[in-house]
Structure formats: structure tokens, C-alpha cells
């Protein structure tokens, strides 16, 4: 519900182009995890193929507007959710942007980006707090995970 509503609202925005997963991955490889100046993130994103107007719109949102520095992951996760219609699309996007070339992601890395995703669904429509907690508790100790193993994990049985 959250993701489908966000995707529909995104399509209605003037001058917004949902960036490709490849462009967002390129940005993530350059900026890493550390806080970064919004201007620098926008510059890197534009160099990687993300529309300047899209970045300006996202960085002017309340959650980012008041800060000089932003966490790149939060911005990238928000951008990738704007293209998907549901949690399954969002999870696939997390792997496309933050996963390794071989399709794996370190389990603790998955927990971190999933937390960013869950934070966006602040009302718990698609990602209830119980799911966020289950992922945090059960994934941290796992070996690297794939998108398929996430889909098959019992924590996601009711969410997908």
C-alpha cells in the first residue's frame, strides 16, 4: 500500500523521473555510507544519470531540507522506492543498488538498508514494526543473503 501510493504520487510529480537501479547503484559505489553534503550527492547523482530536477525535488523534502549533510543510503532508498509498486519491488531494488555483483549482500548490510526502507513506511502499512524487528533479530547472524533467500525467509511469509 505505501509503495503503490508512493509510486502513484511520484508519477504525478512534475519534472520527476524515477532513476534506474543502475544509476542509483553507481551513486552508491561512489558515495558509500558516510554523511555527505547534499550538493555533493546531487553532483554525483547527476554524473551517474539521475535527473538534476529529481535530486533537487528529493533533497528539498522536509526530511532532508533542514540538513547540510545527508546519509546517502536514506536518499537512495527513497529514490528506489519511488519506482516500485510493492515491498517485493523495493526488496529487489535494495539488492540491485546495494548488493554485490554476484547477487549477495552481507546480512548486516541488508538489515541496515531494510531499516531505511522500514523507516520510510512510517505508518507500518507494508512493513509493520514486528517485521522490522524480526529482520533485525534474525538476519544479523546469517551468512551473506540473496534476494531469493530473503523472499523465502519466514519473516517475509506474510509480507510478500
Image (cartoon, rainbow, N blue to C red):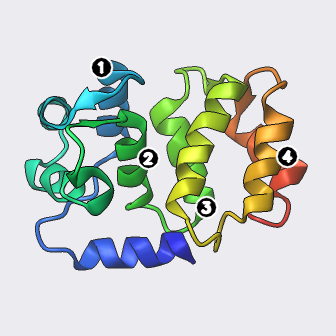
> Tag on residue 77?
2
Tell me whether circle 1 and circle 4 mark residues in contact (CB < 8 Å): no
Which of the image's four quarters has the N terminus? bottom right
**16 above or below 37?**
below
Q: How crowded is mark 2: few (under 14 residues within 10 Å), some or many (20 or more)?
A: many
Residue 74 lies in what quarter of the image? top left
Tell me which residue sits at (20%, 74%) in the image.
13
Secondary structure, mark 3, is helix
Residue 60 in picture, x, y percent from top left: 18, 57
Residue position for label 3: 87
Label 1: element kind: helix
Residue shown at 51%/69% (left/top)?
3
Q: Do the residues labelled 3 and 1 touch (CB within 8 Å)?
A: no
Q: Between disc 1 and disc 4, whose residue precedes? A: 1
The numbered mark at residue 106 is none
Q: Position of residue 27 (x, y in %)?
A: 29, 30
Residue linked to disc 4: 153
Q: In this rendered view, identify the residue nearer to me: 68 or 39.
A: 68
Tell me the CA gap for discs 2 and 4. Answer: 21 Å
Please rate how many residues cluster around mark 4, counting C-alpha atoms within 10 Å: few if below 14, some from 14 to 19, many from 20.
few
Kindly report the distance in space between the C-alpha atoms of the residues bearing marks 3 and 4. Answer: 14 Å
Can you identify the residue that label 1 sits on?
Answer: 30
Earlier along the polypeptide chain: callout 2 or callout 3? Answer: 2
Q: In this view, does 24 lie above or below 86?
A: above
Q: Distance between the residues labelled 1 and 2?
A: 15 Å
Q: In this view, does 125 lie above or below 45?
A: below
Query: In this image, 32 relative to 104: left or right?
Result: left
Amino acid at each position: 500500500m505505501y509503495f503503490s501510493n508512493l509510486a502513484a504520487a511520484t508519477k504525478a510529480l512534475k519534472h520527476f523521473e524515477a532513476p534506474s537501479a543502475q544509476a542509483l547503484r553507481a551513486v552508491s559505489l561512489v558515495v558509500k555510507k558516510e554523511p555527505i553534503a547534499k550538493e555533493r550527492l546531487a553532483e554525483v547523482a547527476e554524473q551517474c544519470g539521475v535527473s538534476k530536477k529529481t535530486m533537487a525535488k528529493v533533497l528539498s523534502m522536509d526530511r532532508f531540507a533542514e540538513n547540510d549533510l545527508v546519509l546517502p543510503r536514506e536518499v537512495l532508498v527513497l529514490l528506489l522506492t519511488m519506482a516500485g509498486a510493492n515491498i517485493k519491488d523495493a526488496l529487489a531494488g535494495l539488492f540491485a543498488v546495494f548488493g554485490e555483483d554476484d547477487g549477495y549482500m552481507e546480512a548486516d548490510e541488508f538489515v541496515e538498508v531494510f531499516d531505511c526502507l522500514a523507516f520510510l513506511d512510517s505508518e507500518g502499512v507494508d512493513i509493520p514494526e514486528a517485521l522490522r524487528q524480526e529482520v533485525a533479530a534474525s538476519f544479523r547472524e546469517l551468512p551473506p543473503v540473496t534476494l531469493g533467500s530473503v523472499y523465502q525467509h519466514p519473516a517475509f511469509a506474510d509480507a510478500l
